[in-house]
Amino acid sequence: MIRERQTPMREQPPEERIRNFNEVPLGYTADEAIREAERCLQCAHAPCVEGCPVGIDIPGFIEHVKQRRFAEAIATIKAANALPAVCGRVCPQEVQCQGVCTLAKRFEPVAIGRLERFCADWEADHEACCPAVGAPTGRRVAVIGAGPAGLTVAGELRRAGHAVTVFELLHAAGGVLMYGIPEFRLPKAIVQREIDALCDMGVEIQVNRVIGQIRTVDELLSDGFDAVFIGTGAGLPRFLGVPGENLNGVYSANEFLTRTNLMRAYRFPEYDTPIKVGERVVTVGGGNVAMDASRTALRLGAKASIIVYRRSDEELPARREEIHHAKEEGIDFQLLTNPVEFLGEGGRVRAVRCVRMELGAPDDSGRRRPIPVEGSEFEIEIDTAIIAIGNGPHPLIPQTTKDLEVNRWGNIVADPETGQTSKKGVFAGGDIVTGAATVIEAMGAGKRAAAAIDAYLSETGS
Amino acid sequence: MYKILEKRTLGPMIREYVIEAPDVARVAKAGQFIVLRLHERGERIPLTIVDVDPASGGVKLVVQEVGKSTREMGDRFHEGDNVLDFAGPLGIPSEIERFGTVICVGGGLGIAPLYPIARDLHRAGNTVIGIIGARTADLLFYEAEMSAVCDEMIAMTDDGSNGRKGFVSDPLREILASPRRIDRVWAIGPAIMMKVCSEVTREFGVPTIVSLNSVMIDGTGMCGGCRVEVGNAARFACVDGPEFDGHQVDFDLLISRQRYYAEEEACALDRYMAEQKGAAQR
């Protein structure tokens, strides 16, 4: 008899967690994990594996969990995924592995993400399993950007025996995992642990390296790197383009989250970087980043944290779990609402003027186009606004690389299957190619690019 | 870790550092900047590059100790010590061409980033007129360095304690009003000084470049915190600048945005001073 519902995961209660930055879901115990693993049907055709952008042997690792063979379980995951503790937490499993789980046709799907997280966390408390590294091939690969795409490429190629050097612009590796996703959703110590595991495999990570300036992509190739992977991710934030947006107190989500996560502004003045929040905060946007920013604002002391989104609940692009957590924490969702102007006083924002929207005919994206309702303008008094409507590509590499084809938005043009760019030996993947997407999609692109780079290195064998 | 190769005092609370960063020293050009972080809890501090020595790998910077982090750097980081992080070069280099006659105006700390620009303009065959100024004689530095790379040099202090008494915009106006042909002006210093200089040059229709020091976090084209309005469009000082057309910059917005964290900066500085005092008493 199959249990219809997932084994629940304990969470910090909302009233408690909005006062701290600790992780919200607390993870499974071993017994809870085994209980959940028992729900897996071990389907022969394993649709879940198809649904996983990095192709983890999901039934395989779940069977190990069921048999209490946790070391084997994590080894199985790590054979396909270098960042399991991260993916178990931030992947949108509901539209990937769990979305296609056979059980989901009638019941709740197997909680694959929670099981993945359990295995990764179990490993942290026990002997780490360092994936086998192949015999040295004598080939060298440069990876630009130590985010999800770059780290995946690094792990895969290192495992194949290539020497890998990762160049990171910031002072810490991890990319969006470090600067973007908040501590309460993805503890930074966990990200660091996964990065350390890559270093243990022999991946070399150099931080504070401004590639494009200190060395161009072409120079890296002439320096003796046999291939280059560009995974430089998101860059400058998009703004609404409405009046008053440059007032003090109007942040991009990137700035707000970078101050908080990477620079630890929530511990100012113990840490040097400050942040200002005030009592009333509006976050504009409906994606995961908007949820992260609005929930961060609460934890920084906001009394009211409001999300303003121009479409309806149904169209919110954020994961349902994030929306659910945000609502539990008391985030006020002002849907079908769009900002038209920020109003200031003494250079500082004091209110946002919004207009109500209604949904009209579908637009190019297939979603119904929001149309302003005439005469519906109103003001929301605020101390801080956060604009979370996306990013352009990071500008540095396209700016400094000759003959690298980019599209009209500045994203690098790369083959979706291989990551091959317009330059020989140069591959790219992640947000720098696709525009803002998810961690696991970037990792999937990294995995495909790594396979293509490996093939390229064999073809061009020395 | 990046070693401090040299440290010297240029004036009260003004210090010059040479920090070992060979990658940066090899390629950095006038007008670019770096970001450094002193220690694990430190903020990312953007500083414009003053000079580089590819042979020794040294990058020269001048720091004015105006806040907690810069004070801490002055008090606790000495020759032979290391700073934790150092990344660069960032930003677009100054456009160095043979323009003809160029006036380089530096106010206060702005003299430091102005120096390599004046030097490179001079090397490119321009006639360079230097105007440097500070509140008082103690705070005026690089007089000799600037004199060496300028065909004419005018020093100014607000109180007349060194050179002429007055603001840097005074001789700027005099020269522009004279029959001499001036092809371009660089003005680097406090926002208000760059604003005044840009207003003066606008009257005479002389193209003017300013270098904007807005508040930055990453400094690499990611956070958008350093945005400024130039010609009514939002631009980012870190990747579109730091140099912009002074006649197009909204300086009032820049000044307002620079002051946003004044309270927090004061709080951090007070806390640091109290800590220093406590340490001295023990």
Image (cartoon, rainbow, N blue to C red):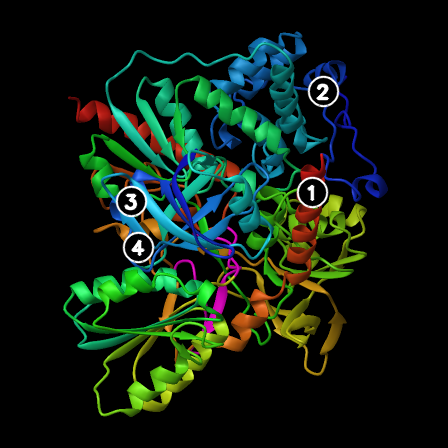
Front residue of B186 and B109: B109
Identify the secondary structure beneath mark 2: helix
Identify residue for label 1: B275
Q: Position of residue A202 (x, y in %)?
A: 39, 19
Identify residue for label 3: B25
Q: Is residue A40 above or below residue A298?
A: above
Q: Position of residue A111 (x, y in %)?
A: 67, 27
Q: Give the number of the mark in front: 1 or 2.
A: 1
> Which amino acid, by three-letter code, is at mark 2?
Glu
User: With B196 as the anchor, is A288 left or right in this view?
Assistant: right
User: With B13 as the anchor, is A231 left or right in this view?
Assistant: left
Q: CA distance from mark 1 to mark 4?
A: 45 Å
The part of the chain drawn in magenta is B215-240
Identify residue for label 2: A36
Front residue of B1 and A315: B1
> Residue at position x 44%, y 62% from top?
B109
